[in-house]
Image (cartoon, rainbow, N blue to C red):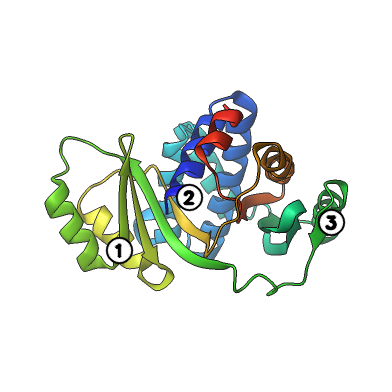
């Protein structure tokens, strides 16, 4: 999981600038809209909305923006549909792109154009099912109020598969089916989650040279900058050298 943890830290650092923060806000607004339309505007009765609000806090999204997004979705607002795309970047790096869109034709056209421009190849849905596993990922700052021994026992009892503590950040990984149980347990423990959701984690990663990796990561960045894209997952091994080159 170390490569995944490193990528999470890099994404947090990249998200510090205004343009990236605005993109994060846009993603969360869409997630709020989906959650409200699914189960209503009350976060106490809507676990998905509660999760979206936690994620909003994690990127310092103003409370007014969150409330505005909930009210807009409750009154109708925009409708978004999920779409996903699977393919390969250069050098055999698997890429999975998750989207929420209000215009499927636009999204298909944009994603296909990015694959083509960066010498990748768009595959059929399901073609990467053997490459990625869907896992629940929760991240939050390590605080002095958390008794780590007791916390680990609580998490294992709730279904956690892995608990990683690095640079003051705790990452809890669960099987997809145990995501809800772990979310409830963290709520019960009154732990403020910085970010949580289902993510696609590669079963195996591929090592490239720094130069090759940076070209692939440029493609990943362009995907992430597209307004319809919520998340991008890949099978590139993020070595320390690559992480340093990205700073």
User: Is there any visible trace of residue 27 in the rendered image?
Assistant: yes
Which label belongs to residue 160?
A: 1
Q: Position of residue 217 (x, y in %)?
A: 68, 42
Q: Position of residue 42 (x, y in %)?
A: 41, 55
Q: Position of residue 64 (x, y in %)?
A: 49, 33
In the image, what residue occupies the spot 34% across and 56% down?
44
Q: Which residue is tagged 3? A: 112
Which label belongs to residue 106?
A: none
Disc 1 versus disc 2: distance between alpha carbons? 16 Å
Estimate how packed mark 2 is, as few (under 14), some (14 to 19) or many (20 or more) residues with alpha carbons within 10 Å.
Answer: some
Q: Single out the mark in the foreground, 1 or 2.
A: 2
Disc 1 versus disc 3: distance between alpha carbons? 36 Å
Q: Tag 2 or tag 1, which sits nearer the N-term? A: 2
Q: Single out the mark in the foreground, 2 or 3.
A: 2
In the image, what residue occupies the spot 45% across and 59% down?
48
Q: Which residue is tagged 2? A: 4
User: Is there any visible trace of residue 41 in the rendered image?
Assistant: no
């Amino acid at each position: 999981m170390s490569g995944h943890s490193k990528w999470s830290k890099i994404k947090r650092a990249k998200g510090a600038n205004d343009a990236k923060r605005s993109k994060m806000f846009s993603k969360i607004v869409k997630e709020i809209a989906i959650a409200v339309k699914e189960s209503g505007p009350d976060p106490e009765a809507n676990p998905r909305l509660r999760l979206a609000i936690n994620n909003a806090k994690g990127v310092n999204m103003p409370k007014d923006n969150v409330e505005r997004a909930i009210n807009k979705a409750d009154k109708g607002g925009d409708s978004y549909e999920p779409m996903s795309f699977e393919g390969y970047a250069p050098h055999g790096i698997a890429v999975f792109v998750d989207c929420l869109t209000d215009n499927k034709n636009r999204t298909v056209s944009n994603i296909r154009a990015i694959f083509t421009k960066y010498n990748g190849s768009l595959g059929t849905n399901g073609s990467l099912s053997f490459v990625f596993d869907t896992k629940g990922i929760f991240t939050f700052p390590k605080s002095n109020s958390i008794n780590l021994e007791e916390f680990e026992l609580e998490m294992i009892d709730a279904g956690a598969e892995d608990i990683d503590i690095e640079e003051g950040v705790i990452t809890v990984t669960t099987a997809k089916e145990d995501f809800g149980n772990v979310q409830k347990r963290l709520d019960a423990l009154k732990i403020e989650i910085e970010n949580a959701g289902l993510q696609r984690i590669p079963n195996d990663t591929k090592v490239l040279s720094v130069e090759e990796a940076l070209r692939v990561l440029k493609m990943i960045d362009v995907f992430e900058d597209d307004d319809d894209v919520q998340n991008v997952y890949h099978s590139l091994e993020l070595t320390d050298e690559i992480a340093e080159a990205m700073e």
